[in-house]
Amino acid sequence: MSKVKKQNVDDLRKRVKNIIEILEREYPDAKTALIHKNPFQLLIATILSAQCTDERVNMVTPVLFKQYPDAKAFAEANVSELEIIIKSTGFYRAKAKNIISCCKALVEKYSGKVPNKIEDLVKLPGVGRKTANVVLGGAFGIASGIVVDTHVKRLSERLGLSNNTNPDKIEEELMKIIPKNKWISFSDMLIWHGRKVCQARKPKCLECSINSYCPSFKNFT
DNA sequence: ATCCCGAGGG
DNA sequence: CCCTCTGGAT
């Protein structure tokens, strides 16, 4: 690694440390917005959350889990009945298909229990790194990586923490500059901040608590 | 019109 | 790398 690059990484680490300190005060109980601590329910809720708000996911999950309490029940579910229940979360056909095949795999390979290793989770149908990291962090408390969703992606770019567009590359870069004990809370804080302040369209830069650390501040004011 | 706590497939 | 899948909120 070149000297210049190492210096950049050190600067980034310092800047991230300050950003994290401010956000921790602003969002003291940053944790997953999906209300399920149970690994299985968190997994299903996270699959449902693609391109859809957590409020809407939390709207359907009570009836969903009453109807299908475990992986076995989902594995044997009727596709169109499942589709009707999750319709309001969008992408419902793909999600229903993914959830059923995911649960079939859980029943066959893991006797219905959610594995706690990222290599295993990512192999499940419909589960990518984002979903896997949410489940590992939210339900198992394991910092196996960093959740990169559209909010984390957008804020990382605006804050100058990563120049990449590929979520896997962004995760890789973030892991280098963020202390491991902040991996789980970091994404949640960015997601909260991304929804409340640093929105995609009209970011509220003037009321942003970390604007002095943001290279994009001038672009929006 | 445009965006939302994505993943699979070409 | 791109595209598609979907309803709902703003």
Image (tube, coloured by chain):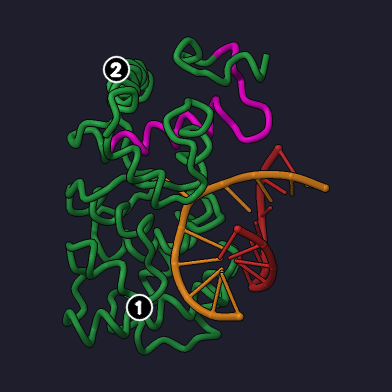
Chain colours: A green, B orange, C red
Label 1 neighbourhood size at 10 Å, few (<14), some (14-19), many (20+)?
many
Q: Is residue A36 left or right of residue A215?
A: left
- Dominant SS of magenta comes to helix
Work out whether residue A209 or residue A216 is closer to the camera in this orientation and state it: A216
Q: Determine whether the residue tagged by mark 1 lies in a helix, strand or loop.
A: helix
Pointer 1 chain: A
Which quarter of the figure has residue A47?
Answer: bottom left
Residue A74 marker: none
Q: Mark 2 points at which residue?
A: A14
Asked if the magenta segment contains residue A59, the reply would be: no
Could you tell me which residue is drawn at 46 percent across and 47 percent down? A149
The magenta-colored residue range is A185-207
Could you tell me which residue is drawn at 17 percent across and 62 percent down? A116
Of callouts 2 and 1, the N-terminal one: 2
What percent of the width, then of the height, locates residue A32? 34, 44
In the rendered image, the vertical position of residue A166 relative to residue A176, given as above or below: below
Work out whether residue A21 or residue A93 is closer to the camera in this orientation and state it: A21
Q: Does the rendering let one see residue A21? A: no
What percent of the width, then of the height, locates residue A57? 48, 57
Could you tell me which residue is drawn at 32 percent across and 18 percent down? A11
Q: Mark 1 points at which residue?
A: A102
Quadrant placement of the N terminus of chain A: top left
